[in-house]
Structure formats: C-alpha cells, structure tokens
Image (tube, grey):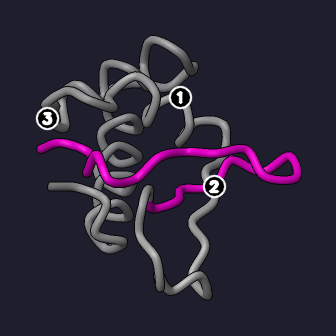
C-alpha cells in the first residue's frame, strides 16, 4: 500500500492537517488532523510502498510498546487511512 500522493500535510494554526493538493471545489467540511504519532508514521512512509509490518516496526522503534500493541495500533492507523481514502 502507499499513501495517496495527492494529499499533503500542512500545519495550520498549530495543527497538522491533511489537504488535497491542486483541486478546486474540494469538500473542506471534513478535516483530517494528525496527532504526533500519526504524523511520524505519515512522514516516514510517505512516497514509499509499505506493509503493516513496517508500521509496527516504526511504532516499536519510536515508542515504548511491545509488538502486540504496535500491531493493534498499526492496523488501526491503516484502517483510518483507508476509511479516509488516503491510501492507494
């Protein structure tokens, strides 16, 4: 899977927000804000193919979580991106 390259993260008023680049008439009533861990994963995986195991490894590397918890969190993060159509 890969993060859709049409989307970029921009800091707006101190919040990290996902925006669509170069589209007019985009529905701005739905805003996707990234917390610290989501932003870390986004930045690390943007512009590359990745699998759940890559997300798990990043979470374990940067946070004090075991593999079991990292797997649950990784799947939740991926599910959220899929739900928002941010993954190709």
Front residue of 57/30: it is: 30
Question: Depth-wise, is mark 3 or mark 2 nearer the camera?
Answer: 2
- 14 or 77, which is in the foreground? 14
Residue lying furthest right: 13
How far apart marks 2 and 1 lie (CA) works out to 13 Å
| Main SS, magenta residues | strand
In percent of width and height, residue 49 lies at 13, 31
Q: In the image, is residue 7 part of the stretch drawn in magenta?
A: yes
Magenta stretch containing residue 14, yes or no?
yes
Query: What's the mark number on residue 51?
Result: 3
Judge from the rendering whether residue 23 lies leftward or rightward of residue 88; answer left or right: right
Count residues near mark 2 (Cα–Cα under 10 Å), then give few for <14, some for 14-19, many for 20+: some
Mark 2 and mark 3 in contact (Cβ < 8 Å)?
no
Sequence-earlier tag: 2 or 1: 2
Which residue: 56% across, 37% down? 39
- The quadrant the C terminus occupies is bottom left
Instruction: Please tell me whether mark 2 sits on a helix, a strand or a loop.
Output: strand
Query: Disc count in the image?
Result: 3
- Dot 3 lies on which element? loop
For label 1, the SS is helix
Q: Please tell me the numbered disc located at residue 40.
A: 1
Residue mark closest to the camera, 2 vs 1: 2
| Closer-to-camera residue (83/29) | 29
Boundaries of the magenta span: 1-20
Q: Which residue is mark 2?
A: 17
Upstream in the sequence, badge 3 or badge 2?
A: 2
């Amino acid at each position: 899977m890969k993060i859709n390259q049409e989307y970029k993260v921009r800091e707006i008023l101190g919040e990290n927000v996902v925006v669509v680049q170069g589209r007019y008439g985009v529905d701005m009533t739905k805003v996707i804000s990234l917390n610290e861990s989501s932003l870390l994963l986004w930045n690390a995986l943007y512009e590359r193919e990745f699998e759940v195991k890559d997300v798990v490894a990043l979470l374990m590397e940067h946070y004090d979580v075991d593999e079991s918890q990292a797997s649950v969190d990784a799947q939740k993060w991926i599910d959220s991106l899929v739900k928002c159509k941010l993954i190709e």
